[in-house]
Amino acid sequence: MPLLCGTPGAGYQYEYPWDPRSKPLLRIIVTALALTRADSLPARSPHSVGMSGARLEAIERVVKRGISAGGYPGAAVIVGRKGSTVLEEGFGSLEWNDPEERVDPHRSLYDIASLSKVVGTTTALMILFDEKKIDLDTPVIRYLPTFGGGLKNDVTIRHLLTHTSGLPPGRDIWRLTHDPVAARAAILATPLDYPPGQRYVYSDLGADVLGLVVEVVAGETLDHFLQRRVFGPLGMGQSFYRPADSLKYRIAPTEISPPRGYPIRGEVHDENAYAMGGVAGHAGIFSTASDLALFAQMMLNGGEYNGVQIMSKETVDLFTRRAFGHRALGWDTADGNFGSGRYLGSNAYGHTGFTGTSIWIDPDRQMFMILLTNRIHAARAKRPAKVISDVRSDLSDAAVLAVMDGDETLAMPTRFRADREIGWNPVARRHPRRHVASRHHKTTTHSAKRSKSSKKKPVKHHAKKSSVHSTKASRAE
C-alpha cells in the first residue's frame, strides 16, 4: 500500500509501490490486450422490446441538427432496452476538416471527460464498498493522512461522493506543476471553502481525492484497478486511460488551442488530469459508445453482466439513489435538468461530461441512452454548450417517448428543442447609428454659428483653445 508522508508543499512524498507514470510500451501492451476482448450488446428491433422505430427516428433529426448548427462535427449514439441495443449509429465525422473520418459507435474513441467520475472512480469505490474495504462515513484522513487539518478532518467519503465536502469546484493545478506526484500533493493540500455537509458544490477536486482513496485502499493505480476489475471482466476492450498513439486515427480530437500549446488528440483534454499523468478521479477515460453500453447494461442488471458480477445489486441501488438534493453517491439523477430530459423515471440516474458526452440509465423502463461528441473541438456554433444541452435532453426525451408498452403512451411533441434552436446561434444586436445627414447638418449649423459670431466679435487669444476642443469632440464622434 502506498504511503503518504511529509508536509504538503515542502518535501511532500507520495510513495507508490508502482510507477504512476507507466512507460509508453506498457500502455501499448495493455491497450492491445484489452482490444482482443472487445464485446458488444446484441442488437434487436425496437418493436421486439416494446418501442416504436418511427419515434426513434426523431433522434437522427435532433443529432444531425446539432451538427448542421455547428455544435459538434459528429456524434456516436446508442439507445438500449431490455438487454439489447435498438439504435446504434454514428453521425458526422470525428473532426470538421476531414469528413472521411466517419463516426462509428463501435470504433470511434472519445474523451468521456466527467463520465470518468462514474464509469471509473465511483465504480471502483462501489467495488471496495462491497468488499467492506471502505466506509462511506469514515473521515478521508483515515485513508489519506495528509488530507487533514481543521474542518478537513471531518470530511467523509460520503461528502466527497455527494459534492458536499467543502472543496472548491476546481483549482489550476496544471499552472503549478506537471509532475503527477506533485499534482496529487497539491490536490490533497487544497483548503475547504466551507464546512463539510452544508451545501452542494460540484467539485472535480473531490473526485480526484476519491481516486486517491481508491489507489491507497486497492494498492494499485486507478487505471490498473479498473482494467482488472471492471473493463477487462465486462469485455470493455476499448475503454482505458492514456490510449496508445497507434489509436489516434480513430480518437475524436478536442481542443485545438489549449494551454498545452498544440491541438489535442489522444491525450486527456482536462489540464489538471493531464498534469496528473492522464489518470485522475475526475477525468481521463477514453471509450466508445459500444463499450459504455456494456457498462450501462451491467448497471441495469444490478451489477452483473454475462455471468460476471462486478458489484452487488444492493450497492448499485444505494449509490444510484438520491442522497443530497438531486445528487446520488457519485451519480447524478434525472430531475428535468442537466441534459436528462423531461420524461425519465424517478429512479433514473446518469452523468454528463464537459467534452459533450452523457449517459442516462432508467431502471424502471430497463433502458439507457448514450451520447458521445467532441463539442469542444473548434465548435462553429456561437453557443455550443446550449446546443449540446438541448441535444442531450432531446435524445433522452425521444428515447423515452418511443417506449410503447407501458400503461400510457406519451404524446410526441410537434417540435423538439433542436427543432427550435433557441439560443444556439443568436444574431448580434446592431446598435442604431445616427444618420449621416444629421451629423452633417449639425456640423454645418455649428460652423454657421461660429462664422456669424466671428463677424460680431474680433478673434481673441482663447480661440486656439476652442479649436482644440472642437477637434477632440470630432474624434470622439
Image (cartoon, rainbow, N blue to C red):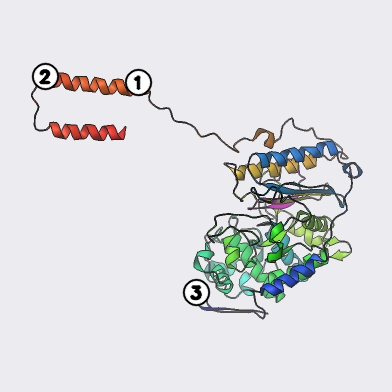
- Does residue 212 sit above or below 109 in this rendering? below
- Sequence-earlier tag: 2 or 1: 1
Residue under label 1, please give it. Answer: 437
Secondary structure of the residue carrying numbered label 1: helix
* Labels 3 and 1: the sequence-earlier one: 3
Comparing marks 2 and 3, which lies closer to the viewer? 2
Relative to the observer, which residue lies in front, 145 or 177?
Answer: 177
Query: Magenta stretch containing residue 346, yes or no?
Result: yes
Q: Give the residue type at disc 1.
A: Ala
Q: Nearer the viewer, mark 3 or mark 1?
A: 1
Q: Is residue 12 magenta?
A: no
Q: Earlier in the sequence, mark 2 or mark 3?
A: 3
| Residue 261 locus on image (x, y percent) | 53, 60
Q: Which residues are magenta?
A: 341-357
Q: Residue at x 60, y 66 (%)?
A: 155
Q: Quadrant of residue 212?
A: bottom right
- Which quadrant holds the N terminus? bottom right
The crowd level at tag 1 (other Cα within 10 Å; few <14, some 14-19, many 20+) is few
Q: Residue at label 2?
A: 455
Question: What number is the disc on residue 9?
Answer: 3
Q: The C terminus is located in which quarter? A: top left
Element type at marker 3?
loop
